[in-house]
Image (cartoon, rainbow, N blue to C red):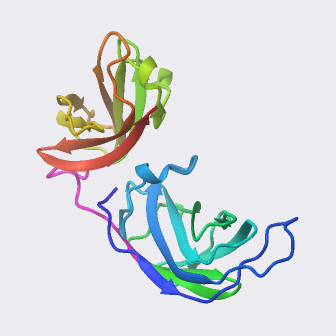
Amino acid sequence: MRAPSSTAVLGLACTLSLAAGAAAADPPALGAVTIRLFEQADAEILAVARRLYSTRFDATRTRTLGVEIAASHAAPEFAAEVPVDCTMHKPDGSAHPPDRPLILAVAAGATYSSSAGLPWRAADAGGWQPGEYAIACRIAGQVVAESRIEIVQNEPDVAGTDIRVAAIRLFSVERALPAKDERRYASTLVAAETNHIGVELEFTHAPLGQTMRIPVECYYFWPDGQTSPAVMLNYEPQATWSGGYSAGAIGWDQPGHWLPGIYTVTCMIGGRPVIVDRFDLT
């Protein structure tokens, strides 16, 4: 995931469709419309505080692309659900149709509305094709917002190899680090019930022809500005492996020490950040 970047903004006079069952009324016209893109797992849509918006995404790590659409408008008397048709064109010019619909929900009496969806998984069986993607969102057949994003094949995360970090996952740990098939991954944990918080990295690469030991340092940035001690991981691929996992955890033997709020986790190899994510403690 990358740092926040610019967004696309268009102004358009466009009427909203009334939600089913609403009384007849003149719906408001849309003012400025914006779209922002973010990447996440193909799961429940991340809360706004946990989205990492960008116009540049990693071809190896990007799983599902989400789009957030927001619009200003006059306050309607009744709620409305507005279908939004977002299209994506790949670097070769071919269309990548959305997997799922996007709806802009407008609340009665509101003058600003925002909704998000996860319309696109990887465009090709082999993953995301590096290059520039063009995105346009339409309401009632009219383009209301546009954006361009870049999918890049970044340099390997370990110099002299093609080792890349493919994914990061968080999980609760009571005491000892559980075996991989016993880990229950989650992006939201209960602060009062959490002892340790584990972080797992997934690596991808061709067979290396030799054994290696890759030290990794991960840090948790707390909601109040604290930074955790380093969570030390070691990825030790064997000569014939074409990928693998490494995990570690940090915390206390008793729950009650974690503050509620949004945390950021950053993992580094050779002092360089290679992947970032956010998780929530409620």
- Determine the image quadrant of residue 152: bottom left
Question: Which residue is found at the position 59% from the left and 87% from the top?
Answer: 143
Residue 75: x, y in percent? 64, 73
Residue 90 vertical position relative to residue 81 in the rendered view, above or below: below
Q: Find the magenta span and give its range.
A: 148-165
* 241 or 129: nearer the viewer: 129
Would residue 92 be visible to someone looking at this image? no
- Determine the image quadrant of residue 258: top left
* 124 or 148: nearer the viewer: 148
Horizontal side, residue 7 vs residue 214: left or right:
right
- Determine the image quadrant of residue 141: bottom right
Residue 161: x, y in percent? 20, 50
Residue 177: x, y in percent? 36, 17
Residue 10: x, y in percent? 49, 85
Horizontal side, residue 89 vs residue 173: left or right:
right
Question: Which residue is found at the position 42% from the left and 57% from the top?
Answer: 62
